[in-house]
Image (spheres, rainbow, N blue to C red):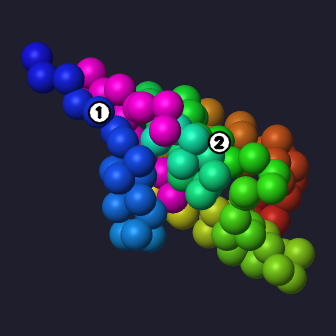
Amino acid sequence: MTRRFVTRATVDATLARGETSMELSGAVTVTDEAATRARERGLVFVRDGAVVAGRPTPSSAPEPATPGAATGHVDRAAVRRAVVATLGRVPPELDAVLDRVLGPDGPGR
């Protein structure tokens, strides 16, 4: 089996395409430099639906991309669609996470 590496250049190319997450599968190794770059730039690495590296720090986190965040109105359905579109699948516990973040009776419920 061939081992793949995610490097700083991989992170930069992913960000240049406008992506904010990268799904890792199989025997993929993220270099320390790539993890640092991802954390600095707000790219997250996801394996089996869980963030495994690159979680943004408060000083490097991009402005909220949640639909309606600027006005204080959050459309739950739009957030759910954005998550599914980004990941390409419905992650386990998505609705439970949305309940924790938006409240069980939050907007769009």
Q: Is-magenta flag for residue 25?
A: yes
**Pointer 1 with pointer 2, Cβ within 8 A:** no
- Mark in front: 1 vs 2: 1
Q: Residue furthest bottom?
A: 71
Residue 10: x %, y % from top left: 34, 51
Going by the image, does 50 lie left or right of 24?
Answer: right
Q: Which image quadrant: the C terminus?
A: bottom right
Is residue 60 in view? yes
Within 10 Å of disc 2 (Cα), the crowding (few <14, some 14-19, many 20+) is many
Q: Is residue 22 left or right of residue 44?
A: left
Q: Which residue corresponds to mark 1?
A: 5
Q: Residue furthest top?
A: 1
Mark closer to the chain start, 1 or 2:
1
Between 52 and 8, the one nearer to me in the picture: 8
Q: Amino acid at mark 1?
A: Phe
* Residue located 72% across and 40% down the image: 97
Q: Position of residue 101 (x, y in %)?
A: 81, 48
Under circle 2, the secondary element is: loop
Q: Which mark is residue 55?
A: 2
Start-end of magenta stretch: 20-33
Three-letter residue code for mark 2: Arg
Quadrant for residue 107, please give it.
bottom right
Residue located 82% across and 80% down the image? 70
83 or 109, which is in the foreground? Answer: 83
Which residue: 11% across, 17% down? Answer: 1
Q: Position of residue 88 (x, y in %)?
A: 38, 51
Residue 91: percent from the left, percent from the top? 51, 39
Which residue occupies the foreground of this view, 35 or 48? 35
Residue at left offset 54%, top offset 48% = 38
Q: Secondary structure at mark 1?
A: strand
